């Protein structure tokens, strides 16, 4: 399974790959229950991460790696 962009209306537990394109220097933090993973955008702003989702909530936060400013955060349900 893969998810890209803002169309994350429904996520199922299991292996999922999330990816996108932002500005360079953005850290993406993903929290699912007691598991926290992060990935940083490359010099072109691309990012991707594969993780095993558990039922519950998935919080995704986008942070400026230099200033620490949080640009966006949202929580999604995982079935």
Image (spheres, grey):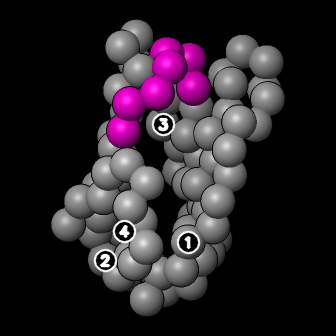
| Cα gap from disc 1 to disc 2, whole angstroms | 15 Å
The x, y position of residue 48, in whole percent, is 33, 40
Tell whether label 4 touches label 2 (CB within 8 Å): yes
Magenta segment range?
20-26
Question: Image quarter for residue 65?
Answer: top right
| Cα gap from disc 4 to disc 1, whole angstroms | 15 Å
Residue at image position (43%, 89%) is: 79
| Cα gap from disc 2 to disc 4, whole angstroms | 5 Å
Question: Image quarter for residue 45?
Answer: top left
What is the quadrant of the N terminus in the image? bottom left
User: Neighbour class for label 2 at 10 Å: few (<14), some, many (≥20)?
Assistant: few
Residue annotated with mark 1? 76
Tell me if residue 50 can be seen: no
Instruction: First in sequence, mark 1 or 2: give its number.
Output: 2
Residue at image position (24%, 59%) is: 2
* Secondary structure of residue under mark 4: strand
Residue annotated with mark 4? 52
Residue annotated with mark 2? 14
* Secondary structure of residue under mark 1: strand
| Cα gap from disc 3 to disc 1, whole angstroms | 18 Å
Residue at image position (75%, 37%) is: 70
Q: Nearer the viewer, residue 70 or 51?
A: 70
Tell whether label 1 touches label 4 (CB within 8 Å): no
Mark 3 vs mark 1: in front? 1
Question: Image quarter for residue 72?
Answer: top right
Q: Nearer the viewer, residue 4 or 49?
A: 4
Instruction: First in sequence, mark 3 or 4: give its number.
Output: 3
Tell whether label 4 touches label 3 (CB within 8 Å): no
Tell me if residue 79 can be seen: yes
Instruction: First in sequence, mark 2 or 4: give its number.
Output: 2
């Amino acid at each position: 399974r893969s998810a890209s962009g803002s169309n994350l209306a429904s996520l199922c537990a299991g292996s999922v790959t999330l990816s996108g394109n932002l500005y360079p220097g953005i850290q993406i933090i993903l929290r699912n229950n007691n598991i926290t993973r992060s990935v940083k955008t490359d010099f072109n702003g691309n990012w991707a991460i594969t993780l095993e989702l558990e039922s519950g909530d998935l919080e995704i936060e986008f942070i400026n790696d230099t200033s620490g400013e949080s640009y966006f955060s949202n929580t999604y349900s995982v079935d």
